[in-house]
Image: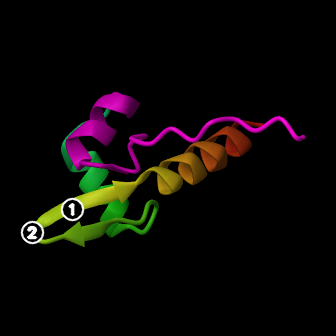
């Protein structure tokens, strides 16, 4: 049998602009600017803007590649 890692049931998949700002140590306005400039994608859930965790992973990968 293959070793399979258990799936984390409640792993966070969406983040608010404030959470993203705190994670990257930037301002919330900068997060909104990044969204408006197309650097990261976001979606609206009712009236709340949310950034998918997958977008954050992609963005981190891009900035790491840009460093080299």
Instruction: In this rendered view, identify the residue nearer to me: 5 or 65.
Output: 5
Q: Quadrant of residue 38?
A: bottom left
- Look at the numbered disc 1 and give the secondary structure of its residue: strand
The answer to whether residue 37 is left or right of residue 66 is: left
Q: Position of residue 30 (x, y in %)?
A: 28, 47
Residue 45 magenta-drawn?
A: no
Q: Position of residue 21 (x, y in %)?
A: 29, 37
Name the residue rendered at 44%, 60% in the picture: 40
Q: Position of residue 2 (x, y in %)?
A: 88, 41
Find the residue positioned furthest to the front. 1
Q: From the viewer's perspective, is residue 8 above or below residue 44?
A: above
Looking at the image, do the residues carrying marks 1 and 2 touch, with CB atoms under 8 Å apart? no
The quarter of the picture where the N terminus appears is top right
Q: Position of residue 67 (x, y in %)?
A: 70, 37
Q: Which residues are magenta?
A: 1-25
The residue tagged 1 is 49
Name the residue rendered at 55%, 50% in the picture: 59
Name the residue rendered at 62%, 36% in the picture: 6
The answer to whether residue 51 is left or right of residue 29 is: right
- Main SS class of the magenta portion in the image: loop
- Look at the numbered disc 2 and give the secondary structure of its residue: loop
What label does residue 47 carry, if any?
2
**How busy is the neighbourhood of tag 1: few (under 14 within 10 Å), some, or many (20 plus)?**
some
**How busy is the neighbourhood of tag 2: few (under 14 within 10 Å), some, or many (20 plus)?**
few
Name the residue rendered at 67%, 38% in the picture: 64
Residue 18 magenta-drawn?
A: yes
What label does residue 12 carry, if any?
none
Give me the C-alpha separation between circle 1 and circle 2.
Answer: 7 Å
């Amino acid at each position: 049998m293959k070793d399979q890692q258990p799936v984390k049931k409640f792993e966070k998949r969406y983040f608010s602009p404030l959470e993203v700002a705190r994670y990257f140590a930037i301002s919330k306005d900068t997060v909104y600017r990044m969204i408006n400039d197309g650097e990261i994608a976001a979606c609206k859930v009712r009236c709340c803007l949310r950034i998918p965790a997958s977008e954050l992973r992609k963005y981190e990968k891009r900035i790491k590649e840009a460093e080299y």
